[in-house]
Image: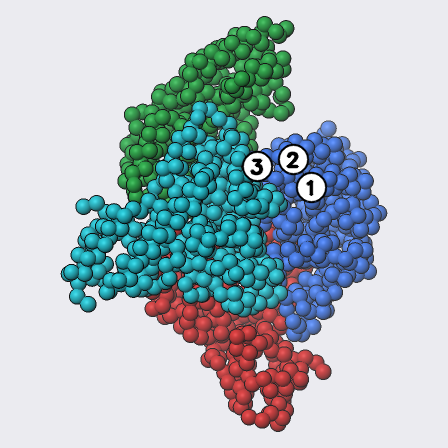
Chain colours: A cyan, B green, C red, D blue
Amino acid sequence: MTEILFGSDNQAGVSPQVMDAILRSDDGIAVAYGDDIHSGRLNAAFSDVFEHEAFVFSAATGTAANALGLATITPPYGETICHEAAHILTTEGGAPEFYAGGSRLVGIAGSNGKIAAHDLCLVLDERMRPSRHHFACSSLSLTQATEFGTLYTLAELEALSEAAHTRGLRVHMDGARFTNALVALGASPAAMSWRAGIDVLSLGTTKNGTMNAEAVIVFDRALGRDLAYRQKRAGLLTSKMRYVSAQLLAFLDGGLWLQNARHANETAKTVADILASVPGIRLTHPVETNQIFADIEPQVTALLEKSGIRFRAWDHRHPTRHRLVMSFRDDEQKVERLRMALALALSHAQF
Amino acid sequence: MTEILFGSDNQAGVSPQVMDAILRSDDGIAVAYGDDIHSGRLNAAFSDVFEHEAFVFSAATGTAANALGLATITPPYGETICHEAAHILTTEGGAPEFYAGGSRLVGIAGSNGKIAAHDLCLVLDERMRPSRHHFACSSLSLTQATEFGTLYTLAELEALSEAAHTRGLRVHMDGARFTNALVALGASPAAMSWRAGIDVLSLGTTKNGTMNAEAVIVFDRALGRDLAYRQKRAGLLTSKMRYVSAQLLAFLDGGLWLQNARHANETAKTVADILASVPGIRLTHPVETNQIFADIEPQVTALLEKSGIRFRAWDHRHPTRHRLVMSFRDDEQKVERLRMALALALSHAQF
Amino acid sequence: MTEILFGSDNQAGVSPQVMDAILRSDDGIAVAYGDDIHSGRLNAAFSDVFEHEAFVFSAATGTAANALGLATITPPYGETICHEAAHILTTEGGAPEFYAGGSRLVGIAGSNGKIAAHDLCLVLDERMRPSRHHFACSSLSLTQATEFGTLYTLAELEALSEAAHTRGLRVHMDGARFTNALVALGASPAAMSWRAGIDVLSLGTTKNGTMNAEAVIVFDRALGRDLAYRQKRAGLLTSKMRYVSAQLLAFLDGGLWLQNARHANETAKTVADILASVPGIRLTHPVETNQIFADIEPQVTALLEKSGIRFRAWDHRHPTRHRLVMSFRDDEQKVERLRMALALALSHAQF
Amino acid sequence: MTEILFGSDNQAGVSPQVMDAILRSDDGIAVAYGDDIHSGRLNAAFSDVFEHEAFVFSAATGTAANALGLATITPPYGETICHEAAHILTTEGGAPEFYAGGSRLVGIAGSNGKIAAHDLCLVLDERMRPSRHHFACSSLSLTQATEFGTLYTLAELEALSEAAHTRGLRVHMDGARFTNALVALGASPAAMSWRAGIDVLSLGTTKNGTMNAEAVIVFDRALGRDLAYRQKRAGLLTSKMRYVSAQLLAFLDGGLWLQNARHANETAKTVADILASVPGIRLTHPVETNQIFADIEPQVTALLEKSGIRFRAWDHRHPTRHRLVMSFRDDEQKVERLRMALALALSHAQF
């Protein structure tokens, strides 16, 4: 029995157009470290899409991209405010602290993975008391789409950034699923980044169809200069950069990024509807992008597992809580397999 | 006029067999972070080749691999002894210091890029004086093949490692061009690594045909545990690891690594012979692997440049010093182009 | 009107016997960096008192002592478990993270400033899941006396250390008020440190009568070697060390440390009894050493302030919560002043 | 036989006026962490002396002061240029690298411990080539008086600072023996610091009569804010700060610092003259402040040692090279003892 994997969008492999671009960039001998023609086009391509001069630094992983981005706006004695479920806090093995040189992350609660502006102001006002006995409250990291697949509206992003900026903090966006949020909101890249007050953007592309290409994007030359040095000393400056740059260009090219994200989001809606209709399954968060969180009865989970359906237990404190993530690659057949497995499960289960 | 690039072996692109392996690993949806079937074979494949249980950690760049490897054997208050021309000292933007948390690199001189055992002993004995006012002399980094394309013999490696080990240091090998050295010496991987006293090996594959896959290899489980944490917090643990692991497996598969390195070395011999026969060009180091260093008269350099031959000025203090590097991809046609350009140059130049 | 300060025991100045020792050590010209006769006696003096070979490293502040001590048992990718009110977590400006090179502190709740063994086991078992996506759970820090002036019994310390050790962690004690705890428990230094499983002890002396002399003490030579390097590179190795060592020796000499702590504890009992008898004041934690925590009605607070009594608001979330700390220097007259101010306040206040 | 120590000025103990000030500051209970009256006067006192608003941060050691000062003007990816004999490079156990988060120190040669402006420009121009493969050349550290007791003239300091500033670097002065230089030059504190382009000054006082009080001084509020956080997280913010501040105030008070330094310098001149007159002893550097460097014949060294005269072998590569340092405490009797020991030595030695 083949397994059907819903564990994460990083399981989806590479988008065919991206693989083609990689192959096309394999065009003989080319200069290294970003002096090739593909890499030379990066800043312009992203500047065009973001309607602002952009400085783009690639990184092999989202963890590296986040840590690199945060380090440029957080002194070693600084603290970064983020949601308590933020990936940078829960699953990055201390990379943000390492890159920043010993900073601290402070998680704050908020429903559906979102920080409320009111809560942020309370926390900031409390932490901004001048005292050299404490960290300097220096940066805010927002995850868009959130860790629970939900969305900040543009107005919410703007309010949060403003709360941070007026208190002297700078703002990072963990955009591991930036594009899923973008198409869900129908927003422009500019509106969801620098116009909303984002100083540093970690733009994820790997989960949305590339092989290993994350981008840290800033809109300010001085930050870019700092990032260039930090990228190198972190060992993130690749020699055969053309293969990474080609991925990033292909990602944008012809709107592939938007198509892929839209497909993943729409598939998630379909799957969410299927799940919601099943007794013994309860969606725990609004499904606004490509992630689905649900409480699933142990019986159902066991029967789905038996049918080869694989998804992830999400919270060891809530054993019924699970996550399913859709990607650009998920087709109708995969959805159908899930539907059939659920039907089979239902026929056995008793609620 | 097409440019003919001799600047570095990292300009050579990807070996076709490696690209095929990447494409084959793009086989639908697969679990991430190393739990795929390709990644699952890594340790065994390298253990087999190295005739010893090996723990393999991939990294996107040679800089990251070196820094990661050194950090596991160098405390933050430690110093690393290396050749004064070592890449870790001259061209890695502080990555070793960053990863180790503030260590210091100490370069020592030596002809042809090699540290002499006698010199090492003198330096170590001087630096091992017990004093808490100084760094703790903790690790030795050897580059094989050296920065000048020359080779340590196995006996030399063993003597250097022993000098280090008997004084409590551990030994790292920067093997960015490990395979070029391996085939030149006709040595086994085991003989040139753990049997020669190497504790941590940065095995470069990118310069020898892969896209972006360097490996840090240790032969000790405790070091491996340390490396696993360090790899993650440095942001080097890739989600779609299968594409990296597939490269590393293809690299070994059927001896591709050895073939590629042998080809590059042999081409270098041919090119070196051509260069050596030209008045106005003098080889400055023995050509033992795939790198050629030569003093080239400015006139010749200018004329070669005019013919589209690109190579690298190597030392701003010696403006005539240049480097040419051969790769698996260099064919007879490329060599012929160089030969013709030299002939043309000679017909113009006057010595 | 003279102010009467109850803010902290670090306001108490220097014990006369310690000042005498400083003056006596000012005996002309003496070799520096610990080679003087005073410093030469340190290890022996503490080994004697602790009934175990001890390696002693002085530090100018408690923050430095804690950070130094923790760094020697916490890798840069490690996390330290502590009480959520621990000084290292709340008030040391990131020193532990800095010294360890980017570690993380994890605070856990517990009544009266104490971690319960059962809670510790739950937290450790949760955090010890093998995963390279997370920090390595590496050390436990216990504060004795606690941040709320309460005490771990010896049995509690032993149970906590054992829970940590059996899971591979090592144990640090923040003993800023070690001696206050020691005399309150009637324990021996050995029983409250290495016999209870403490690997690294930050022994505070400044709050108990010295000028600026904290000690990091380990009972293992290898840890001592590591500490020696870390002490120097943190800039904590003083040149005129005799003046610090003399303080530490005087602290022990004739049991001064025990007398001073006993006096502070007893005074705290007296003051606590006075406070407890006042309507509008409620002790919030058992007064077991020299710290008193109390909820004080705003009216009373205001009237005490007016009488020149100074003490510290402790928790901005509970504006009535205050702390008073007693020291070796507090005499009957000072207590009397407080008693009179309270009487005056009561005559005005209405409850 | 009493030993007569000429090893270092940090062996001299505490100036009586400073000890008095310490005793006077031991005036009962006082608020901690710099809110006492002594500490409150620090900035004003130094602003007055330096004729510029000054922000003063105390540190327990010169190593800490240097590392703290450099960290505020050197990013973690930055390099610091200094003389190859600079204390920060040779004898501080990696503290500058630790505090800055992984920076690199680059030593350049120069006779008599001085960097020549011409050499500095050459080095800077070479290292300022834009390249992200290298460290960012960020700061210059000048030692005044130098490690060999010699002096930069004010014009030399200005030229060096200007060379640095025009290339975007900032300038640190290691003033462990600032005052010895000040009185030797007859310069004002302003002229030898901010007017000469010094951005951050480590002002040593311990070698010149205090117990353990070094000061990092900046003339810019933003640098001061940064330093405040760094001082705390390094564990350098002392609780009983009054005892340190009192030392720093006493140091300035009535010109004690100038008197002490003048005395040490003058004694050094006397001793240098005595030494210079002895066959078998050759001064190796001009004696411009309180340090004397000399080549001393092994026979003479042995005979002096036998007479109880203690001084320091300086360079293991030149076994005859020795250093003697004079301090505020050295009196005529001590000089006489040296003179007699020399006479005795001469009567035995044969040259």
- Residue underneath mark 1: D168
Which residue sits at x=48%, y=26%? A30
Q: Earlier in the sequence, mark 2 or mark 1?
A: 2
Confirm whether circles 2 and 1 share one chain. yes
- Residue underneath mark 2: D128
Q: Residues within 10 Å of mark 3 (few under 14, many from 20)?
A: many
- Residue underneath mark 3: D132
Q: Residues within 10 Å of mark 2 (few under 14, many from 20)?
A: some
Task: Measure the C-alpha gap from mark 2 to mark 1.
Answer: 9 Å
Confirm whether circles 3 and 2 share one chain. yes
In this rendered view, identify the residue nearer to me: C86 or C214.
C86
In the image, is residue D241 above or below residue C322? above
Residue A243 relative to residue C265: left or right: left
Chain under callout 3: D
In this rendered view, identify the residue nearer to me: B347 or B155.
B347
Image mark for residue D203: none
Confirm whether circles 3 and 1 share one chain. yes
Q: Residue A21: x and y, percent?
A: 42, 33
**Rendering quarter of residue C164:** bottom left
Chain under callout 1: D
- Is disc 3 placed on a helix, strand or loop? loop
**Rendering quarter of residue C28:** bottom right
Task: Measure the C-alpha gap from mark 3 to mark 1.
Answer: 16 Å
In this rendered view, identify the residue nearer to me: C78 or A28.
A28
In this rendering, does residue C22 appear at all?
Answer: yes
- Is disc 1 placed on a helix, strand or loop? loop
Q: Are marks 2 and 1 in contact (CB under 8 Å)?
A: yes
Q: Residue B6: x and y, percent?
A: 50, 20
Q: Residues within 10 Å of mark 1 (few under 14, many from 20)?
A: few
